[in-house]
Image: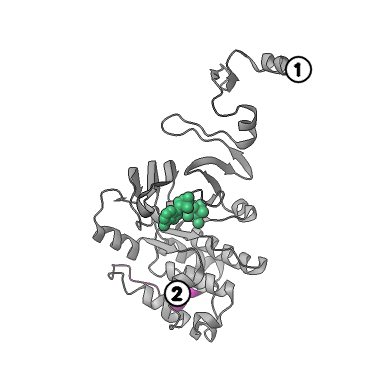
Amino acid sequence: MSWFEVTDPPAVRQATAEAEMVPGLGVACRGVVYIYRPEGHDVVALAGVDLDIAPGESVALLGPSGAGKSTLMSLLAGLLRPAAGRLTVGGHDLVHADDAELQLMRATAVGVVLQGAARNLLPYLSAEQNVRFAQRGAPQSGRGLPAPRDVLALVGLTDPGRNRLRPQRLSPGECQRLALAVALATRPGLLLADEPTSQLDSGARDGVLAALDAVNRAGTTVVLVTHDPDVGRRMGRTVTIRDGRVGAEGRRGEDYAVVGHDGTIHLPQDVLRLVPPGTLLDVEARVDGTVLLVPAGESTVENADAHRR
Ligand code: ADP
Ligand code: MG
């Protein structure tokens, strides 16, 4: 019986899940900076990211194009190294790890789905062969590797005939789920998926989200990038990246500002319209535990309201 079987009766599935749960990996980012240097000039893609993700969480990264989401995913995958800050994934210190450690981490502990399903797949191999190929880099660990058929079943690719086809014969939704299966081939504790639902119709999108949910319930920490607020709502937690920093966090559809480790706070856009950059704020901590941000010279909100009138 395999951890990857998803069609068993619930009792069997429960026993399987307990026996073969994947230990999810946690993530800690402290002041993470990344700078691209195309042709000599600097592009600061990440300007101090503070973010903790607990083992087994599922998180959606949202934010405008160019905000730094893909860069952050590449850093978490150990494909790029931070210019400054601290970054750990599970027991790996990604600032100080040597190339061999990063390579081993990618081969065993972290599954990556790059933006655009085709970039993750070998066009001349069948679906099943693609999964088998992804297992080749993993040194045989004590728990062994799942059968490719079981990995494919986890993401809903259960038709043996279709699993013998090459990617170009599969639908866009099937290709995206195959890319997930390839990333999951070694039962990673962290799955990173960059826009896995973009360019899919709603049916295919739901198939990918169901696959991600199954992976997460089996213990794997899931971090995905999306532009789709609906997808964000279906994840446990949303983190908005803006201008290379964590701009806001969401829980159950509500957005919150986040206090960074250095005490900085990034105000939501609607608040920023009231207190433009450069505004001096008096920060009042009140006995009831609430905090007021009052523009200088307006000691209370009531005064501020009166002032505006
Ligand atoms: P997102 O995924 O949120 O759209 P990216 O992480 O791709 O954002 O990009 C963040 C910033 O870094 C953008 O300003 C982008 O133009 C820049 N950037 C991304 N990749 C490169 C690269 N290879 N060379 C130079 N600049 C890059
Ligand atoms: Mg991107």
Q: What stretch of residues is rendered in magenta? A: 140-152
Q: CA distance from mark 2 to mark 1?
A: 62 Å
> Alpha-carbon neighbours of circle 1 within 10 Å: few (<14), some, or many (≥20)?
few
* Amino acid under disc 1: Arg
* Amino acid under disc 2: Leu
Identify the residue at horizontal 58%, vertical 37% (top origin): 256
Task: Indicate the secondary structure of the residue bearing disc 2.
Answer: loop
Q: Could you tell me if residue 124 is visible in this image?
A: yes
**Sequence-earlier tag: 2 or 1:** 2
Quadrant for residue 202, please give it.
bottom right
Q: Position of residue 185 (x, y in %)?
A: 41, 70
Q: Which mark is residue 121?
A: 2
Residue 235 is inside the magenta segment = no
Q: How many marks?
A: 2
Query: Looking at this view, is 258 or 277 the one in front?
Result: 277
Relative vertical location of residue 21 with respect to residue 185 in this rendering, above or below: above
Which residue appears farthest toward the right when viewing the image?
A: 309
Q: Could you tell me if residue 154 is visible in this image?
A: no
Relative vertical location of residue 19 with respect to residue 297 in this rendering, above or below: below
Query: Looking at this view, is 118 or 149 the one in front?
Result: 118
Would residue 34 be found to the left or right of residue 170 on screen?
left
Between tags 2 and 1, which lies in front?
A: 1
**Residue tagged 1:** 309
Q: Position of residue 10 (x, y in %)?
A: 55, 66
Relative vertical location of residue 36 with respect to residue 4 in this rendering, above or below: above
Would residue 67 be found to the left or right of residue 40 on screen?
right
Would residue 85 be found to the left or right of residue 153 on screen?
left
Q: Magenta stretch mostly in which secondary structure?
A: loop
Quadrant for residue 23, please give it.
bottom left
Q: Position of residue 269 (x, y in %)?
A: 61, 37
